[in-house]
Amino acid sequence: MEIVILDGVDAVDRTAADIVERTVRTTQKSTPVLGLATGSTPVGTYRELARRHRDEGLSFSHCRAFLLDEYIGLARSAEQSYFSFIRENFVDHVDLDDAAVFSPDGEAHDIAAEAQRYDAAIAEAGGIDVQILGIGTDGHIGFNEPGSSLRSRTRVKTLTEQTRTDNARFFDSPDAVPHHVLTQGLATIDEARHLVLIATGESKAEAVAAAVEGPLSAHCPASVIQWHPHVSVLLDDAAASSLALAEYYRYAYANKPRWQHL
Ligand code: GLP
């Protein structure tokens, strides 16, 4: 794990965009596969990638993308669906083919079969090259709430009241937030080649500390990233404020060999 504490949200967005850009430009695969997170945290990264597309010719036309999760029972056309969210905040602003952007179908008749199909589709695409992750205040990644099996695959989860309250800002009323979701499992996420977890703001500080310095535990699902051989955790000062070893992470990053990428 490489924990990178950056000077402000813009630097976090730029650094995450740098990682995605490098993957898109340099991966040996003819079709790089991006793992896209929703939620408000990665929106600045998507904005920066869209700017690079517009101003610097960064192209996504040869890429595919998979979302982490989706609400169950919400129409894809609803603005709160992650299907719509990712289009509004990223896909519609770049040259990524809409048909190459996949997400779990929260309206499927057979949700269990849909979950299996989704994992199979990721595998068939050759796996995810770079996976952007946010983190919930309760330590969830994707929608893997506390108690999620560390080896879970894509499946149904029930949201905690904390997550429903956190996400109520996107809905007309707190009651409108669905209770159930389809989410990539922790093992599914763990198979991506590079995990990039982004967190900004004080409200994420405790969850970040539990994820990277706490025990590997289903109680903090994001702690599963401690298993992974290639993880970049990009934080602003506020999100890093509960880390015991913050000074060491700053020192290590400041002295990182120039030839070594994130
Ligand atoms: C949401 C999403 C996660 C996201 C997290 C944090 O519920 N399912 O993928 O990382 O919660 O969201 P935000 O970035 O808005 O704080």
Image: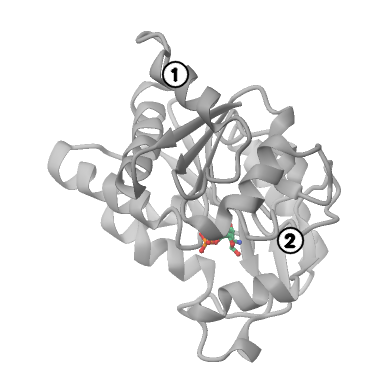
> With respect to residue 165, does 105 lie above or below?
above
> With respect to residue 132, does 69 lie above or below?
below
Image spot of residue 227 (x, y percent): 74, 29
**Within 10 Å of the Cα at label 1, are there few (<14), some (14-19), or many (20+) other Cα atoms?**
few
The residue lying at 51 percent from left, 90 percent from top is 172
Q: Is mark 1 within 8 Å of ligand 1?
A: no
Q: Residue furthest left?
A: 55
Q: Is residue 107 visible in this depiction of the protein?
A: no
The residue at which mark 1 appears reads as 28
Q: Quadrant of ligand 1?
A: bottom right
Q: Quadrant of the C terminus?
A: top left
C-alpha span from label 1 to label 2: 30 Å
At mark 1, the secondary structure is loop
Q: Amino acid at mark 1?
A: Gln
Q: Is residue 258 left or right of residue 53?
A: right
Q: Quadrant of the N terminus?
A: top right
The residue at which mark 2 appears reads as 114
- Mark 1 or 2, nearer chain start: 1
Image spot of residue 207 (x, y percent): 65, 51
Q: Is residue 2 left or right of residue 44?
A: right
Residue 6 found in image quarter = top left
The residue lying at 75 percent from left, 48 percent from top is 221
Image spot of residue 181 (x, y percent): 71, 68
The residue lying at 46 percent from left, 26 percent from top is 250
Q: Amino acid at mark 2?
A: Glu
Q: Are marks 1 and 2 in contact (CB under 8 Å)?
A: no
> With respect to residue 151, does 184 lie above or below?
below
